[in-house]
């Protein structure tokens, strides 16, 4: 084997090893592990929230709303855990399902626009006794959650335009 062919072969092996190492370091969605159609659906969901709620897309499946984060969950993903001191609104009933579920995880005390109709769920995992309020389009409080910790696996989002988690 000539010196040139040896250098080419070792160079190719090194390049392949580097590519394999980099692929392991890149998140699955960025590495193209999800099919193109699924990636397009995920981006369409993100675009919907960006258009209706504003914010900044910080990852393919996350939008930062300055005090809240929208999480776009894949179908059949594990249940989203609502962290302590947070109020989480789930697009669908029972906190997660076979459908791609979306969660608005709120942690600042301010009004958040609720872009959903239909039935969903919520978890109030704020400090003990803290209630969230649900407001209509005029900003009138129509209901409040029991103090934390509390949850409801079946709420009608249709009339709720804003949630204030404190």
Image: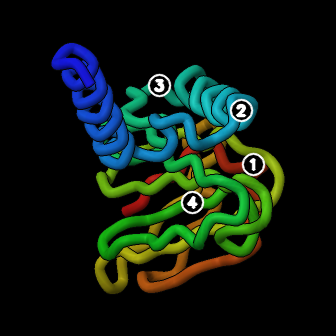
Of all residues shown, which one is farthest toward the front?
1
Mark 3, Cα crowd under 10 Å, few <14 / some 14-19 / many 20+, is some
Colouring method of the image = rainbow
Q: In percent of the image, x 51 and y 49: which residue is there?
A: 71
Disc 4 versus disc 3: distance between alpha carbons?
Answer: 17 Å
Residue 73 location (% of width, % of height): 60, 53
Along the line of sight, the residue nearer the viewer: 79 or 133: 79
Judging by the rendered image, the residue that carries numbered circle 1 is 159
Number of the label disc, if any, that sits on residue 41: 2
Regarding mark 2 in the picture, which secondary structure is present there? helix
Task: Give coordinates of residue 4: x percent, y percent.
Answer: 21, 14
Name which residue lies at 52% across and 81% down.
Answer: 146
Is there a contact, CB below 8 Å, between mark 3 and mark 2?
Answer: no
Distance between the Cα atoms at labels 3 and 2? 19 Å
Say which label, 2 or 1, has the lower sequence index. 2
Residue 64 shows in this picture: yes
User: How far is the residue under mark 2 from the one under mark 1?
Assistant: 27 Å
Question: What is the CA distance from the residue labelled 1 to the residue labelled 4?
Answer: 14 Å
* Disc on the earlier residue, 2 or 4: 2
Direction from residue 86 to residue 53 in the image, left or right:
right
Provide residue 141's location: percent of width, then percent of height: 57, 55
Q: Residue at x 42, y 82 (%)?
A: 148
**Tag nearer the camera, 2 or 1:** 2
Q: Residues within 10 Å of mark 4 (few under 14, many from 20)?
A: many
Image mark for residue 89: 4
- In the displayed structure, 148 sits above or below 145; it is below
**Mark 4 or 3 closer to N-term?**
3
Q: Do callouts 4 and 3 mark residues in contact (Cβ within 8 Å)?
A: no
């Amino acid at each position: 084997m000539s010196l040139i062919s040896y250098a080419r072969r070792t160079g190719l092996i090194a390049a392949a090893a580097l590519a394999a190492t980099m692929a392991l370091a890149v998140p699955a969605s960025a590495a193209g592990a999800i099919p193109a159609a699924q990636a397009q659906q995920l981006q369409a969901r993100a675009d919907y929230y960006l258009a209706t709620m504003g914010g900044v897309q910080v990852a393919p499946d996350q939008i930062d709303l300055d005090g809240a984060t929208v999480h776009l969950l894949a179908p059949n993903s594990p249940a989203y855990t609502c962290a302590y001191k947070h109020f989480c609104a789930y697009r669908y009933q029972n906190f997660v399902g076979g459908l791609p579920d979306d969660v608005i995880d709120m942690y600042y005390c301010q009004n958040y626009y609720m872009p959903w109709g239909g039935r969903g769920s919520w978890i109030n995992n704020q400090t003990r006794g803290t209630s969230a309020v649900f407001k209509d389009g005029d900003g009138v409080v129509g209901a409040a959650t029991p103090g934390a910790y509390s949850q409801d696996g079946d709420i009608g989002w249709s009339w709720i335009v804003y949630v204030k988690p404190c």
